[in-house]
Image: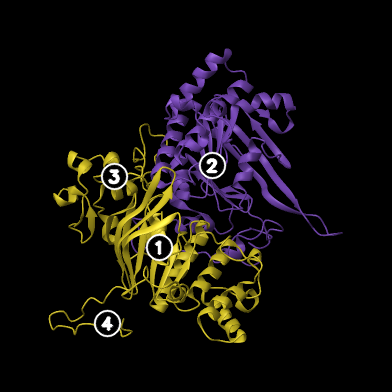
Amino acid sequence: MSPVPATERGPSGPLVQVENLSKLYPVDGGLFGKPRFVHAVDGVSLYVRRGETLGLVGESGCGKSTLGRSIIRLVEPTLGRILFDGKDLTRMPPRELQAMRRRMQIVFQDPFSSLNPRMTVREIVGEGIAIHRLAKGRKEAEEMVAAMLARVGLRPEMMGRYPHEFSGGQRQRIGIARALAVNPDFIVCDEPVSALDVSVQAQVINLLEELSEELSVSLLFISHDLRVVEYTSHRVAVMYLGRIVEVGPAADVGERRYHPYTRALWSAMPDVTAEGKRRLVLQGEPPSAVDPPPGCAFHPRCPRAEEGRCDVDLPTLEELVPGSRHRVACWHPEVE
Amino acid sequence: MSAEPVPSPPPSPETPKPPARPLLEIRDLSVSFAIEGGRLQAATRVSFDVPRGRTVALVGESGCGKSVTAHSILRLLPSPPARIDGGEILLEGRDLLKLPERELRAVRGGRVGMIFQEPMTSLNPVYTAGFQIAEAIRLHRDVSRREARKLAIDGLARVGFPEPARCVDSYPHELSGGMRQRVLIAIALACSPSLLVADEPTTALDATVQAQILELLAKLREESGMSLLLIAHDLALVSEVADELVVLYAGVVVERGPAREVLRAPAHPYTRALLRSLPPRTYRVRGQKGRRLPTIEGALPDLRSPPPGCRFHDRCPDATERCRVEPPSLVATSEGAEARCFLVEDGRGAA
């Protein structure tokens, strides 16, 4: 079955389509031990349309970063297929993939370690332009870098400076300029605002939104912060222990919260306006992705788990309301 | 110096319950750091109280001086480069800044417990959790090893370990982030402090674990009657547990008062801007053109030579000439809080 509903096909259909993607990391099973694997990403299917922002939310260790990186093949997926603009990235010869890399970029979480401290901003932003030979000559390359810096709200005169001369928010703008410089179609934003102060966070969120609208870039917006993801994304996917447990239009996921885990994440999210809100505090912590629990991986922490079912059978993503594009993988979804 | 406690004045008939002296009073605390090109004024005349049995949250963004203030309480700042330039930190009336080092050591981990942001690095990796809790107990109380171990197990049970007798022998690397933070809380509470200082205790933790730790801190505070000073950058997070809020900007207290009132009707333009820049939950129309989050333009002032007037003036949408030259003082707002702003003084604060 194709993960893309019929209504989503056609010319404005998905730019990125991921089918049954898995990434397994071997862990030491001990001498003569049976080799064991961390199921960082476990059979994930998703799609991102042109100009769309898909939010990917989950706690640390759920595999959201690995998934984001596998999609653009910064990490080699173990199984599965990635279609980018109709072409299968997983079987692409290196030369062709190299050219394809211009179209898919990434912005990292840590604006301190993701920029080479020995390179000037001109070199950092200009590197992609040079690699993909996007400029005719030095002068044009420089103009492109200047335009890009201006676009992300930095003064082009700052080009000669080094990363340490900038604040966290400014560095994140440099990272965004680097990603945008090669005119990509798709950007994986891996926790782009998590290391920033609230007021700076708002600036970077606004910038990403402006850019995605003006340039029709598709974004995969990865974050542990449901509040940020819900605000920035058209659609939201909730991930738990390597799998997507709920996906759908941001407003639907936020309002209905079918999956008990989505509900718990939601309830854990602090809110200044909620006075005397009763929290649903989950017990325990996410289990290890080495030998994940059988059945639904969430069942050991789930208040609605049913013995003999949730701990045995793995639920698949299904639409509760046909045509709603809001899908949940749960035997006992929260439906009032 | 008399060792006797200060006698409290007899209650007058008009006020049946006189306001007890706050457990902790910070008065005009100024701290600076020697850095290249001068001294950085990290905290300037910071004053606030932590009443008994209450939770006070000290909030602000990076560089606002919240951690510097918290670390000054137990004199944990390395000196040099740090220097306390003035002020008093009174714990039950005693100035901790003037206490001899030997007496201060009895306060650290005794009357005042502290937990830090990184549960990954705050524990010693070569000792078990139980050993580290027992160590804290034996430092302050004359008990045998066996008794200390028993108390450590009790401590682990109290902070929510399901199998304390087993976990007492676990090494830090065998515990998850949330569990390590629980061990640190157990250490901090080992000697039943009257004040717990928690410096960003949940920042390094996941959302669902964050909620667990906050709930635990609130529960422990209630059970023990201690006071909690919570240092945090996340206003939304502290809003659920704090009784009082102290908002810092560029080393200065810009607003303080009952948490509920400050959050409902923030009076200082900085507090207002900070609250507005949180992504709203009710406003979910992605794709609507022109929809943007309000931001705070500009950057923190250079704290080597802070501006003479209000420290927020160059980022404030309502700043006037007066704000540039004259430092405002804290004035009472209509909401029972205090804000350091001329707008409030002129009665335009709630606008």
Residue linked to disc 3: B312
| Chain rendered yellow | B
**In the rendered image of this protein, does residue B91 appear above or below residue A150?**
below
Residue A298 image offset from top left, x and y in percent: 60, 59
Closer to us: B187 or A219: B187
- Classify mark 4: helix, strand or loop: loop
- Classify mark 2: helix, strand or loop: loop
Closer to us: B336 or B284: B336
For the question of whether residue A270 can be seen, the reply is no
Q: Amino acid at mark 3?
A: Phe
Rendered shade, chain A? purple
Residue B315 image offset from top left, x and y in percent: 30, 40
Q: Amino acid at mark 1?
A: Ser
Mark 4–mark 3 contact, CB under 8 Å? no
Residue linked to disc 4: B6
Q: Amino acid at mark 4?
A: Val
**Which label belongs to residue B72?**
1
